[in-house]
Image (tube, rainbow, N blue to C red):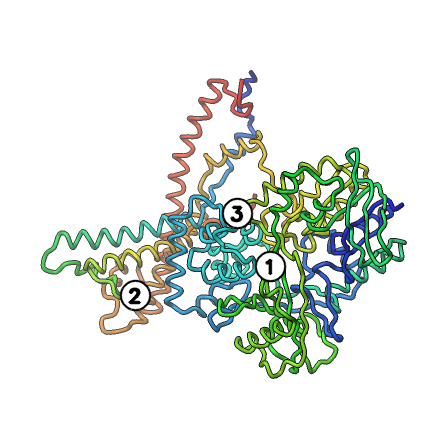
Amino acid sequence: MATQALATDERGLIQAAIVRMRARIMAVVFGLLGGVSVFAATAWLLLRGGQQVGKHLKLLNNYFPGYDVTWTGAFLGFFYGALVGAALGFTLAWVYNRVAESRDPA
Amino acid sequence: MTECVVIGAGPAGLTAAYELAKLGRHSTVFEADDVVGGISRTVNYKGYRFDIGGHRFFTKVEMVDELWHEILLDDFLVRPRLSRIYYDGKFFDYPLKPMNALLGLGPIEAVRIGTSYVLSQLFPHKEERTFDQWVSNRFGKRLFEIFFKTYTEKVWGMPCEEMSADFAAQRIKNLDLVKAVTTALLGNWARRGEVITTLIEQFHYPRYGPGQMWESCVKRLADKGVETIMETRVEALLHENGRVRAARVSGPGGTREVEADHFLSSMPVRSLLHCMEPAPPPEILAAADQLRYRDFLTVGLIVDQAETFPDNWIYIHSPDVKLGRIQNFKNWSPEMVPDPSKTALGLEYFVNEGDELWSASDEDLIELGKRECDLLGLAPSDKVIDGTVIRIPKAYPVYDDTYQEALAEIRGWLEGLPNLQLMGRNGQHRYNNQDHSMVTAVYAARNIAAGATEYDVWDVNVEDEYHEEQREDATAASGDRLVPGHVAEEDLLELVRGAFARYDAVALGSALGVVTALGLFLATAALLAQGGPNVGANLMLLANYLPGFAVDWTGAVIGSAEAGVVGFGFGWLLAKLINGVIILEERNLLGQIEGRALDLFEGED
């Protein structure tokens, strides 16, 4: 059995490796996260109940037309949250990869 | 006696003869038809020229490009390309451009497409055995139904559910909805320096159509003493002792046997097997009979109008007409029509030999063509002054569920006849483009010259690559098979590198910076666009952390810049922290490797 340890150049190669993000996966993950977050936040307030349910969360309808702190709104919020999350995730990965590649073309 | 018999004077047959001549080898070409070029021929009807299917001279195989220019010299035109899809009364750019398609289809359809795409990504077909599964997994079911299903079924005459996924993989693999959207939104910058020519806007075309290339080739062959014998069918290939000895040919001069050392066939595999004497074993003939073909007819219409539509060709996706595709040959080359005040249209119908359309009279087909052209608004029927019908049997080899197995059996049997090589689209039962057919011919000719099988003629065009796409960074010859190899030492090193890859702190910082800045700007802009009293009172609270931020345009710019800096810092710190953990993990593992003297890169004792 050969018993060589890692050569210095191999160790160097390993340490020089830079992560690349997969934009599609990031979009799906962020999308799901965004959708679930808005849905969960809305549902939590609805379940807690009270007099002025979701006074602040309701402000999201400035960006998500039709959104409200209701069960219908929760589902609509899931859709919007997923959409925004996916766009964020995709953009994040895309910009990251472009910058990383420009700095490390290998 | 000739050194080599070449069966068929299409692109493969003539290229093989040409290459053989260049290599100092003599051959004789036999063509059953009275026109050269195979399905790359140009039919001349009263001076109007009709291309069979429209052949762009575009290749990423340098060798083929050189051959084209060697044969035709500079008689090429550079033509602008415009091709569209006709669906539901509207025209859509082809290749598909997402914004154009979404705008054309309207918002409701766009939502349906988007939803079905997301669903296809979350819950893809686990098995990709059929065409519809393959396409739906990549584009979503709705887009498949609109832009793939109808046309594909028209072309192939069978449901997509029965069509092998191989075909989709070979023709459209590199088209990807996410890539396409990115390209539409970000242009070539999204492509990291690659120049992808899927959307090529111009192409080369022989002045008098593709047939000119092959007519010119025949002349060049004649100059080199190579005969192309027309209207002469190869009726039998006589073989004995593991070699093909002679071809029995039949033509105007009668029937005779032509002996040769080598035989190159571009005739349909099924016909070839039935030509063999003695006949192959029954199971091989049965396999040959399993190979199916799709046939094709063009209704050529001459229209008394200088202009009809601006496209080179239009794909007709509407299910309410039988027409599959329409060509405007004048837009391919102005020389295709003898009178500039007229237009020559080619209406393409995909048929099966013997079916209703195939068997219809020319008059009925011309009437059908006029009617459908009128219905689609492409040319008024009363302006059509003449027409002709061109029938092309076995235009397309069909990739069904059984062809691969059948072809493998046939190839196995043919290996027993080493001086017979198969080439070209029908010769190999492969849906090759012209350039790939030519490559198989060049390989076959070079094998003869080398006296050994140095080139695998079957190793062309199986790379699962979309044929319209060309990357400048492509290094492999088109058609080189991508073969999965064993995991090599370098691959293992790559795996370890991947496992311990660091985040680029500047890149993550930049990415988060951009996303944060953009997010805040858009959030502010959305409120400003809505307007109203006390606009953005809550968002304004961010000014506690971002001095200078306000819900106005100046504040948005200042706040975005600050948010970008904060985002950058956060991303940078995040990357450093993650990298710290990775480094600890890596040290731990590498320490174990060295401590135990475990040779990771040898892999075994």
Q: Is residue A105 above or below residue B117?
A: above
- What mark, if any, has residue B297 been given in the picture? none
Structural distance between the alpha carbons of marks 3 and 1: 57 Å
Q: Are marks 1 and 2 on the same chain?
A: yes
Quadrant location, the N terminus of chain B: top right
Q: Residue at x 84, y 59 (%)?
A: B252
Quadrant location, the C terminus of chain B: top right
Left or right of residue B228, residue B343 in this image:
left
Quadrant housing residue A78: bottom left
Q: Secondary structure at mark 2?
A: loop
Quadrant housing residue B346: bottom right
Q: Secondary structure at mark 3?
A: helix
Residue under label 2: B550
Q: Secondary structure at mark 1?
A: loop
Q: Amino acid at mark 2?
A: Ala
Q: Residue at x 59, y 61 (%)?
A: B355
Residue under label 3: A103
Q: Amino acid at mark 1?
A: Asn
Q: Residue at x 64, y 67 (%)?
A: B298
- What mark, if any, has residue B352 been given in the picture? 1
Q: Amino acid at mark 3?
A: Arg
The chain holding disc 2 is B
Rate crowding at label 1 as few (under 14), some (14 to 19) or many (20 or more) other CA atoms within 10 Å. many
The chain holding disc 1 is B
Structural distance between the alpha carbons of marks 3 and 2: 35 Å
Left or right of residue B212, residue B540 in this image:
left
Q: Position of residue B344 (x, y in %)?
A: 67, 75
Q: Residue at x 65, y 39 (%)?
A: B282
Q: Position of residue B218 (x, y in %)?
A: 82, 59
Quadrant housing residue B422: top right
